[in-house]
Image (tube, grey):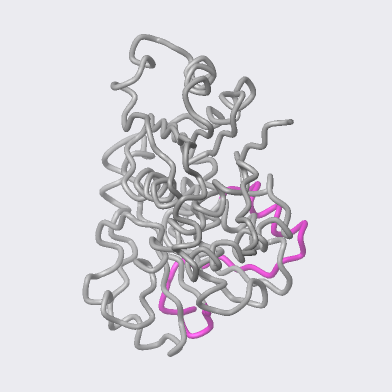
Amino acid sequence: MKVRNLIKITDLSVKEIDEMIALADEIRNDHDGYMDICHGKKLATLFFEPSTRTRLSFEAAMLELGGSVLGFSEAAASSAAKGESVRDTVRTVGCYADIIAMRHPKEGAPMIAAEGSTVPVINGGDGGHFHPTQTLTDLLTISRERGRLGSITIGLCGDLYFGRTAHSLIEALLRYDDMKFVLISPDELRVPRYIIDKMKAAGAAYEEVSKMEDVMPELDILYMTRIQRERFFNEEDYLRLKDTYILDPEKLNGARSDLTVMHPLPRVNEISVRVDDDPRARYFEQALCGKYIRMALILTLLGIKKEAKQ
């Protein structure tokens, strides 16, 4: 049987995404019914770049499904430090695990790794390129908070040039009807041209602005992102731009009462901790959704289904 990988969000059809969201909700509502479904299966987490939520949510997902976990959390702890290619690493780890989740600082590394893999490979983020499991997390959160995917005005704020989470989310939402994108960023960190071209090709409504307060009243969702120090080529540019947007309670005064505030985390200071107790702040719920959607993804790629009760 051909191995199924997830490298970018468009590897999944809209139907598959909707089914995965439904499965994640089912797992959440019937947790005990899924607690041993992956007994005897092993997930390898190969993280060549630091991570907290993505790596731990993958590990929690597999453990709560009754499986086990092995892997490493930094390149220095792997044979990459000796010069081994990611393709060889993944091919070797496939001898020990049933499914692999990997993160790598270089764009395209998970795709190259997957080409030689004998087990499913999941891209847990590759540089400033793709982050499909964060996108699935975001879609599950939006579905739970708004009751739908589509017919939504979403503001994406912060680093929209390097932000792989923003790129993947836009690509996913472009496949749903009646979407409007409000792109909030400084000129230096505007969405790349290829993303704009995709929005135009899809006929989606969009606008690019530099001031958050001007568009706050029209948003259903505000998706904050941090200015990513690790993506900058020099410290001076990072320091100049890092505090461009800081969401605080005062800025939320002009927002709708049913706004959903999201953030893929980690945050630095782009959302004040004073916002955390606002019922519109849903970024920690978003992190929880990440565990359940990864549980659904693991089951889907392994082809494991819950047996119907007799």
At a point 50% along the width and 47% down the height, the residue shown is 164
Q: Is residue 212 magenta?
A: yes
From the top left corner, tell me how far across and down residue 18 is, in percent: 67, 63
From the top left corner, tell me how far across and down residue 92 is, in percent: 49, 16
Q: Nearer the viewer, residue 127 or 303?
A: 303
Q: Is residue 68 left or right of residue 218?
A: left
Looking at this view, name the residue that lies furthest to the left: 274
The image quarter containing residue 225 is bottom left
Assign the N terminus to one quadrant of the image: top right
Q: Is residue 35 left or right of residue 196?
A: left
The image quarter containing residue 267 is bottom left
At a point 36% along the width and 33% down the height, the residue shown is 49
The image quarter containing residue 213 is bottom left
* Looking at the image, residue 279 lies above or below residue 189: below
Q: Is residue 73 magenta?
A: no
Assign the C terminus to one quadrant of the image: bottom right
From the top left corner, tell me how far across and down residue 300 is, in percent: 62, 48
* Looking at the image, residue 38 lies above or below residue 289: above
Q: Nearer the viewer, residue 244 or 65?
A: 65
* Looking at the image, residue 213 lies above or below residue 105: below
Q: Nearer the viewer, residue 89 or 112?
A: 89
Q: Nearer the viewer, residue 26 or 208?
A: 26
From the top left corner, tell me how far across and down residue 107 is, in percent: 52, 32
Q: Which residues are magenta?
A: 192-220
